[in-house]
């Protein structure tokens, strides 16, 4: 379902499909509560949690449900970006849709790394995977994520009230989409 070569090279970045070789690079970042506070997961307490995460992401790629890239700049791991929930068809309906998900380590933020990585992953999704519609959401309390989503050209759909609960608190989420015809 996916092209054989999933590596993406940008002017400053190298994006490679996440694999177990990235475990030691990913581990310290997924333990950082500053990153996890606005993500769907809790800080990892044990490296086995990170190993399971990477195994699940590799399985998702193998099953054609998603692709997660490790982002490197100058040989240094910066974070990840993913196309998740890839849906092609459901019964008589055609979707060709995916959701964009991402995070950067604290020391990599503010350097336009995600802006650059996202532009190339979005182009890859439309050109190489035949995706028609991308969606992305963020916690309403995350203006940095909103800024990068708007830089990518996504269109604001609306706010989902009490979209999910984390740590016993209901959170709202802002939702966006981008069609291949928008570019």
Image: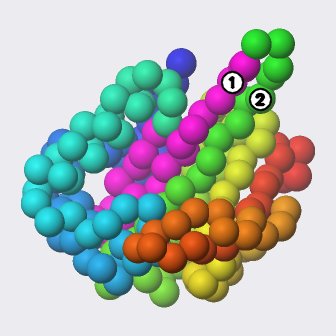
Residue beneath the point at 49% across and 49% down: 82
What separation in Å lies between label 2 and label 1 (alpha carbons)? 5 Å
Q: Looking at this view, is 132 or 44 the one in front?
A: 44
Mark before the other along the chain sequence, 2 or 1: 1
Q: Which secondary structure, mark 1?
A: strand
Residue beneath the point at 32% across and 66% down: 42
Mark 1 = which residue?
88
Q: Report the predominant secondary structure element of the magenta stretch.
A: strand
The colouring scheme, among rainbow, by chain, secondary structure or one colour, is rainbow
Above or below, 155 against 181 in this view is below
Residue 43 position within the rendered picture, expressed as x and y whole percent measured from the top left? 26, 69
Q: Which secondary structure, mark 2?
A: strand
On residue 95, the disc is 2
Q: Are marks 2 and 1 in contact (CB under 8 Å)?
A: yes
Above or below, 151 against 48 in this view is below
Range drawn in magenta: 67-90
Residue 103 position within the rendered picture, expressed as x and y whole percent measured from the top left? 44, 67
On residue 118, the disc is none
Is residue 75 visible in the rendered image? The answer is no
Residue 16 placement, left or right of 50 = right
Residue beneath the point at 89% across and 44% down: 181
The quadrant in which residue 144 appears is bottom right
Residue 29 position within the rendered picture, expressed as x and y whole percent measured from the top left? 25, 71
Quick one: label 2, few (<14), some, or many (20+) residues within 10 Å? Answer: some
């Amino acid at each position: 379902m996916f092209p054989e070569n999933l590596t993406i090279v940008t002017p400053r970045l190298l994006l490679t499909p996440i694999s177990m070789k990235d475990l030691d690079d990913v581990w310290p970042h997924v333990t950082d509560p500053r990153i996890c506070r606005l993500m769907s997961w809790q800080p990892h307490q044990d490296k086995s949690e990170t190993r399971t995460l990477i195994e699940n992401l590799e399985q998702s790629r193998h099953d054609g449900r998603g692709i997660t890239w490790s982002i490197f700049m100058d040989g240094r791991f910066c974070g990840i970006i993913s196309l998740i929930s890839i849906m092609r068809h459901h019964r008589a309906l055609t979707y060709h849709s995916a959701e964009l998900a991402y995070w950067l380590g604290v020391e990599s933020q503010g350097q336009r790394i995600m802006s650059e990585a996202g532009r190339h992953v979005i182009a890859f999704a439309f050109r190489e995977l035949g995706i028609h519609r991308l969606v992305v959401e963020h916690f309403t309390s995350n203006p940095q994520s909103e800024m990068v989503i708007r830089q990518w050209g996504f269109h604001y759909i609306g706010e989902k009230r009490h979209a999910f609960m984390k740590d016993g608190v209901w959170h709202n989420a802002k939702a966006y989409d981008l069609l291949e015809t928008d570019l």
